[in-house]
Amino acid sequence: MIKFKINLLVILIFAIHFAPALSDLLISKLDRRIDLTSQIVRMTLTLRVENTGPDPVSEFSFTFPSHQADNLALFVAVSTEGKGKNRGSATNLPLEVKQPADSPPSLVWYVASLPKALGKGESLNIDALAVFTHMLRPFPEKITQAEPQLFLFQDTAHFTSPYNVKYQTLVVKLPSESVESYTKIENAKFSGSDIKYGPSENLPAMSYLPVIVHFPSNKPFAVAKELVREIEISHWGNVQVTEHYNLIHGGAQSIGEFSRLDFQTRPNVHGASAFRNLIAMLPPRAHSIYYRDAIGNISTSNVYGDSSKTLLEIEPRYPMVGGWKTSFTIGYGLPLQDYLFQSGGTRFLNFTFGSPMNDVLVENLTVKVVLPEGSKDLSVSVPFPVKQSQETKYSHLDIAGRPTIVVEKVNVVPEHNQYFQVHYRFSNLSLLSEPLMLIFGFFSLFVACIIYMHADFTISKSSPSYLAKLQWDEVLGTIQQLQDVINRCLSIHDKLEASLRALSRTGDVQACKAVRKSADSLLKDLSKESKPLLAFLQSSPQAAHILPKVEELVVKERDLQEKIMLKHTTVVESYEKKSGGRDIENRVASIQQKISALKQEVDDLLEFVENI
Ligand SMILES: *[C@@H]1O[C@H](CO)[C@@H](O)[C@H](O)[C@H]1NC(C)=O
Ligand SMILES: *[C@@H]1O[C@H](CO)[C@@H](O)[C@H](O)[C@H]1NC(C)=O
């Protein structure tokens, strides 16, 4: 509340210090209506303007405080001549934001060019509509399920105009017949759901009289943070529309737990500000309508309608309360001939711009018109300023992709749901490109099959890649042979160990020595066998990266072999000297430790080499 008042005061001070130089015009009557029945605030102005000066005047200025201008989604003005029944037809007034050098920065000027200059003593009627978003602030900002949703609206009871105003009234329309509080200045009256201020007479230019209205509202505050509409034209007779919504309840934040049961039993008390459904008004001939979210198709949607419209009622999976979000997609098809027309050599799409959902405020709207492949010379005309770009969309069977017009706009209100046109050139031959492509595609497939059946896919024997592969195979083969040699060595180690165990059981020293003798000669042979294999690997550049490990393996095995031999000799000698079992164990204990460690290392290295 306090912040609001400061806001207003600042503007007031500026206004007082600003003496306009545009005082030749006089507003003889100004009726203003502010509609607060939805989240989108609409202000209609009906003015009668008179030239009281000697010189003709060709411009008329509206001023809005900048905090209102920032939220002004749409502003249009028309002029008519004559009075009462003799009023002529309306002429659209072009509007331009033009700030006079001496204007306070807190005011934004919209300058309308009159259809013809207003001479001395002449009068003109002007009707204007200003549509604002984000002008209602929830107060309190957070409510529980059982509390009512209240909003604050602030404005001035005297429309701030750079001209003197002879007579003016203001009516603020509320969504219901109840109001929490409103600024009670002179002549304020509350009746039905209207607050009436005025009439006020003979107000000087830049008058300002702040008023604040605090009132309950349970209208759905559905805000699409983002809406992407994709309109895809197929010259085979269809316009496919897909709309992706990212929706939030933009009213007072819901705090505390939300009980669905309470909501279902008494929805008007428990969560009165929540909304359960939204209605999309689709064209009458819409077909293949669907509604889905991230989980899948939602069955709680209804489609009904008549010859003038199709209504799609969508119901999110949970009731939407303040601050809750939901994302969903709706899609529908439309007959092409209703929307695509020819003029001269070009075709044009004539389609509606905004969301088909009533009273949804769209903060960021992107409209994409996807044209058939081969379309040329694209242009778009939208009746209000937008951001334009082009991109290419690819789907199956596309070669060059589909030219796509992308139009973006922020703060889109239902009033923006006007027709816009996309013009392009298209040769009918392009229409045949996809069927021809299919035919050609299948033909190519068959030809490819025939070639495949007859082709020899062996790699040329002199190609570098073939040679490299050959060399690598050889390296792998050699490693395998070396591995084999090591494994055979290891099994001989095992035999030696086994002979020692047999010795401790039988005491047969001769048998043990015989095993040792054959082992010696076998290991010598294996050592001879491994030498050329290692030499090959050392000379082969392709083996360079694995050579260190292989060499280490060979060295460790040799080491292991020596230790086992040492153990064998020690044990056999001890037996010959008839030493006791415990004594022998003590003598070989340190050797045995080294053997165990080496065995582990050899095993690890073998595993590494195996996985090359
Ligand atoms: C959803 O419905 C549409 C239209 O009826 C249908 O084409 C689509 O296959 C459905 N999707 C799922 C996931 O059921
Ligand atoms: C677009 O369609 C609307 C509704 O049918 C029509 O009123 C309007 O004149 C059309 N605009 C153009 C440029 O054809």
Image (cartoon, grey):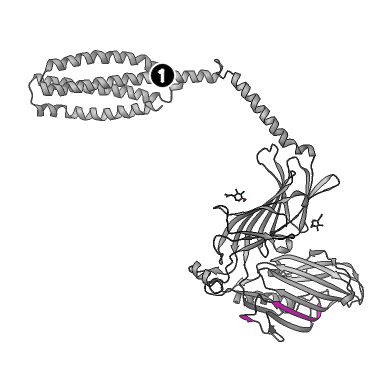
What residue type is disc 1 on?
Gly
Indicate the quadrant containing the C terminus: top left, top right, bottom left or bottom right.
Answer: top left
Left or right: residue 344 compared with residue 233 = right
Where in the figure is residue 534, as x and y percent of width and height?
37, 18
Instruction: Residue 95: say if magenta.
Output: no
- Secondary structure, mark 1, is helix
Quarter of the view holding residue 226: bottom right
Q: Residue at x 56, y 52 (%)?
A: 296
Quarter of the view holding residue 282: bottom right
Residue 380 visible, this orientation? no
Q: Residue at x 78, y 73 (%)?
A: 45
Instruction: Residue 162: say if magenta.
Output: yes
Q: Is 360 rendered above or below residue 481? A: below
Residue closest to the eye, 489 or 360 = 360
Local crowd at mark 1 within 10 Å, few (<14), some, or many (≥20)?
few
Q: How many marks?
A: 1
Left or right: residue 367 compared with residue 262 = right
Residue closest to the eye, 482 or 287 = 287
- Residue bearing the label numbered 1: 477
Left or right: residue 555 compared with residue 344 = left
Where in the figure is residue 188, as x and y percent of width and height?
70, 84
Residue 560 visible, this orientation? yes
Which region is colored magenta? 161-182
Residue pushed farthest bottom? 186
Quarter of the view holding residue 458: top right
